[in-house]
Amino acid sequence: MTFADHRCSWRLLLERCRIRVWMLFNYGNQRIEMATGTPTNGHGDAALSSDSGTEEVRLEQFQYDDGIVRLFATATIVWGIVATLVGLIVAVLLVLPSITGGLPWFTFARLRPLHTNAAIFAFAGNGIFAAVYYSTQRLCKARMWSDVLSRLHFWGWQLVIVLAAITLPLGITQSREYAELEWPIDLLIAVVWLFIFGGNFLMTLIKRRERHMYVALWFYIATIVTVALLHVFNNLVIPAGWFKGYSVYAGVQDAFMQWWYGHNAVAFFLTTPFLGLMYYFLPKAAERPVFSYKLSIIHFWSLVFIYIWAGPHHLHYTALPEWASTLGMLFSLMLWMPSWGGMINGLLTLRGAWHKVAADPVLKFFVVGVTFYGMATFEGPMLSIKSINAFTHYTDWTIAHVHAGALGWNGFMVFGMLYWLLPRLFQTKMWSDKLVSLHFWVGTIGILFYIIPIYAAGLMQGWMWRAMDDTGHLMYPDFIETTQEIVPLWWARVLGGVLYVSGMLMLGINAMMTWMGRPAEYENPVHTAPRLTKHYVDDTPEPHSPIEGAPVLEVGKKVSIWSQMGWHRRWERLPVRFTVFTTIAVVVATLFEVVPTFLIRSNVPTIATVKPYTPLELAGRHIFVSEGCYNCHSQMIRPIVSETKRYGEYSKPGEFIYDRPFQWGSRRIGPDLAREGGKQSSFWHWTHFENPENVSPGSVMPDYAHLLTEEMNYDAIAPHVEVAAYLGAEYTDEELNNTAEVAYKQAEYIAADIVAQGGPAKAYEKQAVALIAYLQRVGVDLFATEEPEAEAAAEEAGADSESTPEEAEPAGDEAAQIDRPDQDVLVLN
Amino acid sequence: MIRDLVSALDYSSFAELALALFVVAFCTMTYGTLRLSQKATDRFASIPLSDEVEDPRP
């Protein structure tokens, strides 16, 4: 073979690929092979030919793969029990923080992410997959494209969950809400989600035998595309070892990206796939079509277009630029309408069939689930209003809100689906219908017992934190007072949790007994359907312009025809194109927010006195992140009078430029730490870790005595400093080349301080010293004075700043930043 | 170059621009959807009700 022949064959191959891609894009639902070709889908489908006159119609036989649905349904139940049990444990840990005997793996801050990850990705995730694998095959009249990919998806996803269950209690975490898992697991998630699940799903759509893609499939497409996008871009990190990665974003930008992800994880993992579930399983259970298909189309595009913009509402009154915050609020408010459009569509599907609801527990679950969706999606936009958010943010109101959504909407929709599916999957009757009804009532009462006290707790926190007397002083200056007041309400939540977990166990027992009553061999009926022909003949008449004969420009007639939406009907038959346009809808919104945030320098004004953390402080911050302290302590003082009175000067965007990840938090079980540096002595912190009650009687914080006993490994600090330097933090050669010595020197200084204050000797050998170094540094740079020479700063690395927030003045460029024109201090009481 | 271009933008009106963008998209979609024939929507809505292929389509 000559070189010319090689080149020719390559050209031919490229040309074939080009044609294949073009045909996929334009005729995605049709076979690319010639009509006389043999389908090779690996399922042994039989193909029967019949002559239709113009083109060969191929009748094909196929069987649905219910085995994979059984696997995912079982995993949903197992992980549902685990997730709710862990939730119950963390609820108990809040009222009885010492119940685990100080074991570091079982603190609230380490287990809370395990609970959220288990609830979202294990319970809801497996529930989504069960729904997708069951409904997609039937909506496409096709078996999943690859059984191997289906199984790889199942086992890959369970592996992710198990890895999460191992790493999170060990303190291996990014400490970014819902994105806690470290980078190796993130890579696994990306592969399993996008390439295995996404690839299998898209190929099933392409090979389908139903011309029109039903609306549930649109929601699945949006879910797969957007979750992949969110996951990849939010988890861009530079590894500092196998168990640690540092975000490429810092401070304000990290916060923006994280809540773009976090909010849209709720949108595209806990909403859109469940809407797909609703649009398929609710009509199936009610045995009547969805109330309005037109409304479902409007619902879909509105939701996909709006949801992606709304993330900044999680960051109102923080150091985020005001324009982004306004944008987030605006779109969050608009979200109310499409969300309620979906709710109305769901509930009105049952019009004329309410008598069925009274008798059928499956429909009861769906009705309550959709109602909770309506409630949560009214409350969400309401909480996004800045003035309301100023009150509710950081309080337990947020916790009640998310649990109304998670327990009511996600939980009950999954339960309804499972109770409808299980008899069909196991091909026998449900073991106990009474137990299904009992689960419904116990679960419903459990949700109410959970959310009502926690709403009350949120309201109490909001009022108490901002309550001021006539003289302008805080009425509850001691944060711990506000926590102690709500402890009885946390106990009520435990009762609600017990009820909800009981319901989960009922489901587990009922499912297991149903499975035991299964036939010796499952029936697997063979279905017959024609393969979709290459050339689709739409039975709807060609669109004609109503102004055909009128004396208007030709372009006017074309616009008139375009407005009849024939092109959208075509999209609905072309999965690849539909996927591309859904992606565009999501990406446009994202770029609109992300590009200015990252490129406009004035969004993050620099502060001359803000310097990188020293090696020891960086190690301490790593401990802070690993322990998940952000779960209880925020680091963001908002420009609100009561807040600045309680914590000090409000936070500035320039203070966070070295914070990877940002640790602003979204809830305060303990006080804010943004100005913690210099507030307490080092020995106070030491004692606080040993037993919080010694210095804060009534504290619900568990002890961190293990930090006082575990050895500090100074040699392990270097990789953290190297990555920080790589990402732009300025370190001296000494700090980079002799990291351990520099850190040790600062640790000795702090240890001496602890001894001088009456503490134990040799504190520098323990991990607590690094965390203390970090806490003593937090928030002090704003008030520091500029060092005359950089070298002096290097020599003094580790020395505590002598100035305190109370007596020092802001310095450097910050003088101009204190009074930001776009964010005045509020007078909210 | 892109950084300079974006930095020169007056982004205070981004929220309004985004709103306008959405309104245009929403109105277009709604208008077109409302023009869908009842026959077509009824057919689409009934897709999940049967796991069998109702009729051999072209």
Image (cartoon, rainbow, N blue to C red):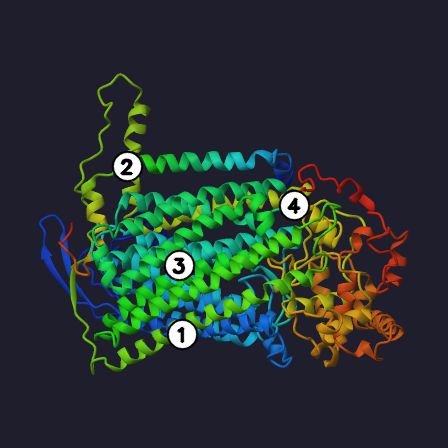
Name the chain letter of the residue that bears numbered label 2. Answer: B
Judge depth for marks 4 and 2 and give the one in front.
4
Dot 1 amino acid type: Ser
Q: CA distance from mark 3 to mark 2?
A: 29 Å
Q: What label sits on residue A829 in the rendered view?
A: 4
* Horizontal and vertical percent position of residue A734: 83, 66
Separation of disc 1 and disc 4 at Cα? 41 Å
Direction front: furthest residue:
A470
Residue A786 at x, y percent in the picture: 86, 50
Count neighbours of disc 4 (C-alpha within 10 A) and say few if under 14, some if 14 to 19, many if 20 or more. Answer: some
Mark 2 lies on residue:
B34
Kind of element beneath mark 4 = loop
Label 3: which secondary element: helix
Mark 1 is surrounded, within 10 Å at the Cα level, by few (under 14), some (14 to 19) or many (20 or more) other residues, namely: some
Judge the density around disc 3: few (<14), some (14-19), many (≥20) Cα neighbours within 10 Å: many
Disc 1 secondary structure class: helix
The answer to whether tags 3 and 2 share a subunit is no
